[in-house]
């Protein structure tokens, strides 16, 4: 059993839904769900992105940030940033989305996708509050298991300072009561 | 903020899918998901029971027991034990199910349902490894949140001895890696 | 190619959701969708009965009658009429339902199911306005095809007097316009 | 009650999934389901296009042609033909798709959409074998009703020669038997 490694840095050419580029360093202290997708990937549209949106909504009081990564490895002309921007608007995607940088030396696989060794889209990566990659899932993941895995990382994160806010803690139970995310009262 | 209270004892007249009656005492050391349902409750059949089945399957390597409770508060003649037994068979429900005892003094609400103050079916109760009620949800609960809540209790349970088995730990992440439930490899 | 045969008569022991027993003779002049089910058949509950309910609702202005047939061939004790009555109530099934009569001479297959040669539940039978069996489907049927098949029989029925009412015609197009069912304006 | 009017001609700038441009004249003798969509319209992607695909598949033995119309009235830069081509590939859309021509004089509504008076996307138009518009639905339409409406037009079409093929007739019942679409045996 090896210790978890730091998550590779993100290499991006643009960001949408955020005023400034996001980096793992800026998010230190928070759990990160990185959702790599393509806007013309049917499984991403039907399943992966809606799941990421639900995570962002249900855990919005927790020290968790959902980050999209548009990792295009086919049909590059079809998924330029103008199309992506319209896609995010029409599908009401509110979380920040980075555009994965083109692969080096003609590599059709974009740079971040390559650095993470992703096998395709959708891919969900869970990064802990110390910036370490803890889980990487290719394809759609079960909500029950994803919830459990996120909670593990959130409980760990509770002992670290959250750099971004003083929001209420993760959903879950403490000595006195079990709190759901804000949406659930 | 008050400390969590011990979960009320179960009062049942019969058990299915188990050789012997289950009690909270016997399950001490394990997290318990108690799913109260009626076999003719559409929301239970379409949503609640399938969720409980998925929990039982996905967390089967964890110190977690899913227990059904057939709490009939209407149409008593329609949901006798012969019907319940056939229902469990046809719907492939494999977890133990207790039959909630009739209410005292002509109370139409069965005894355990009354003791827990349940408002109807389906109701999901989460009980920690110390036998304390930590969460009670009337209606269908979100998988992501349920997964997170179960994980909180499972991580707590890790520090207690499991009376029933030495199965692998809960899905989730440790220092070395993130393990899913056995079904996910 | 043989001419369609008259649909076998129904042999029932009771009826629910109707003041009097239904027979094919009484329904002559109307298209009949006969839906054979068991209340503890998961495919019937999840798919077949909801489809029959939508047909009853969407075509309620047409000369069409949806008839349920409770054809129990297993777990007889579990699905007695008290249970069936509660089931219809809880699932908001409003169409008439006949209870298929026990098979003769100890046959576990009930009488009408045997007469129609049904292979199981759910089974949907389409009977034309002349009382002839035109289609029999075991398992769930596609809505698009079912709609097309019903419409064929309804257009034929238009040339026959409707014994039960003077309701508006079937959904569909005439020389002047295309009318949807009442629910669709 | 007025007689149905001829469907307006289609004004397009390109076609995909077909060797040559389609016109209503070429399709005379066949029923036409015209499905107007935008590739970034969530309701089209999730519901409308899959329904059109199922119609194309289930009725493929019938004198029926499903035609897509890409009618972009917002985010024009985001849905250029390169993007549309990739979209059709990724979503396995096999029916012919015309690109609606830009509106005249700066009209943001494309030409065919304007000529048909469509209110948005998805819109489904049913055109009979004589080239007359018989039904126009904005939003998602019920499969049962759509099947019934198509069958009305297909039965009418049976008396006209089919210009494109001698394929088997529509699903439905004749004097001898009820035939499903080829996929259903």
Image (cartoon, coloured by chain):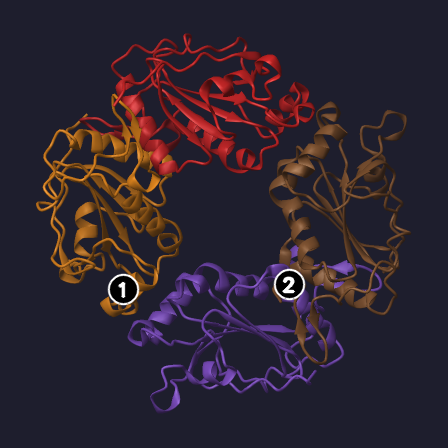
Chain colours: A orange, B red, C brown, D purple
Residues C37 and C113: in front is C37
Residue B53 coordinates in the image, percent (x, y):
48, 29
Determine contact: label 1, label 2, CB under 8 Å.
Answer: no
- Residue B154, given in percent of the width and then of the height, sits at 31, 22
Residue to which mark 2 is pinned: D145
Q: Secondary structure at mark 1?
A: helix
Q: Residue at x 26, y 35 (%)?
A: A150
Residue found at x 49% / y 33%: B48
Please name which of the two marks, 1 or 2, marks the residue nearer to the observer: 2
| Whole-number angstrom distance, CA of label 1 to CA of label 2 | 36 Å
Relative to D41, say whether C176 is above or below. Answer: below
**Which residue is more in the foreground, C35 or D87?**
C35
Q: Are marks 1 and 2 on the same chain?
A: no
Q: Quadrant of the C terminus of chain C?
A: bottom right
Q: Chain of mark 1?
A: A
- Judging by the rendered image, the residue that carries numbered circle 1 is A84
- Picture quadrant where residue A103 is located: bottom left
Report the front residue among D7 and C15: C15
Determine the secondary structure under disc 2.
helix
Q: Position of residue A176 (x, y in %)?
A: 26, 22
Q: Residue at x 39, y 38 (%)?
A: B142
Packing grade of label 1 (10 A; few <14, some 14-19, many >=20) is many
């Amino acid at each position: 059993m090896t210790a978890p490694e730091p998550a590779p840095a993100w290499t991006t050419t643009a960001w949408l839904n955020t005023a400034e580029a996001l980096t793992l360093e800026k998010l230190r202290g928070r759990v990160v769900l990185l959702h790599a997708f393509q806007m013309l990937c049917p499984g991403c549209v039907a399943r992966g992105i809606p799941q990421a949106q639900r995570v962002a909504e249900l855990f919005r009081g927790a020290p968790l940030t959902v980050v999209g990564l548009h990792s295009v490895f086919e049909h590059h002309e079809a998924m330029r940033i103008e199309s992506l921007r319209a896609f995010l608007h029409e599908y009401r995607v509110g979380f920040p989305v980075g555009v994965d940088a083109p692969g080096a030396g003609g590599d059709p696989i974009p740079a971040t996708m390559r650095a993470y060794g992703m096998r395709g889209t959708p891919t969900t990566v869970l990064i802990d509050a110390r910036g370490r990659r803890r889980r990487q899932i290719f394809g759609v993941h079960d909500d029950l298991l994803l919830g459990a895995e996120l909670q593990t990382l959130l409980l760990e994160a509770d002992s670290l300072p959250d750099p971004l806010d003083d929001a209420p803690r993760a959903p879950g139970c403490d000595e006195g009561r079990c709190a759901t995310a804000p949406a659930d009262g």
